[in-house]
Image: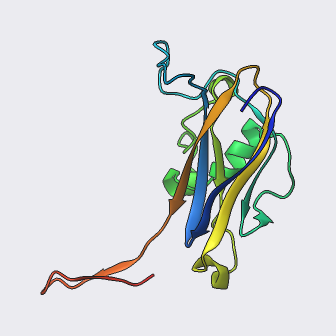
Amino acid sequence: MVSGESFNHMVSNGISNLKAVLIVPLQATRNNNVNIFDDGLPQLMAHINIFNVLVGGSNVLHADARYTYQCFNNEFFNKFGVNGNQSPGLGSNLIDFKSWLKKPYYYVNCSRVPEEQRTAYRSLQNKGTNSCELPMDYMIFAIYEKNFQLDVFSGNINKID
């Protein structure tokens, strides 16, 4: 995406048991050149404005807005922390405020839906505006759950989901 350009990407048209989406902004590569200074982390100051993730056509975040460090904390909080991220001195956010400002990650928890919608196949898309001065590519990870049953006697695997 060029600087200041809006995007609306359809990531998938059918995912069930979607848990979360992680978006990593990377500097766009032209002509398949590799940036020798790339450390594999998000691009410096690659912020997205008017950001949201849509699952089944519905916004996951309350409103389109500038995704901030506080939004990152709210989405990631209690997800992977020791004792639900409630123990003093122990936390799940491995990224501090200054590090996130320099190299942001966009994590959205998509599992807060009614029980009857969890197993339904729904579309996944993201939208926003590139507020970085450089052209950007976005690496999108859809985190979902699949259930199966293993018969230990025969070795057969049956899909439950």
The residue furthest front is 31
Q: Based on the displayed image, in which of its 4 quarters is residue 146 positioned?
A: bottom left
Question: Which quarter of the figure is the C terminus placed in?
Answer: bottom left
Residue at coordinates 69% horizontally, 73% vertically from top-left? 113
**Nearer to the camera, 70 or 53:** 53
Percent of width and height locating residue 13: 62, 66
Residue at coordinates 57% horizontally, 80% vertically from top-left? 119
The number of numbered badges drawn on the structure is 0
Above-or-below relation of 51 to 117: above
The residue furthest left is 153
Above-or-below relation of 151 to 147: below
Q: Based on the displayed image, in which of its 4 quarters is residue 138 positioned?
A: top right
66 sits to left or right of 85: right
Percent of width and height locating residue 51: 79, 45
The residue furthest top is 37
37 sits to left or right of 103: left
Its colouring scheme is rainbow
133 sits to left or right of 18: right
Residue at coordinates 69% horizontally, 25% vertically from top-left? 135
**Nearer to the camera, 56 or 74:** 56
Above-or-below relation of 20 to 107: below
Percent of width and height locating residue 78: 60, 55
Percent of width and height locating residue 31: 53, 22
Question: Which quarter of the figure is the N terminus placed in?
Answer: top right
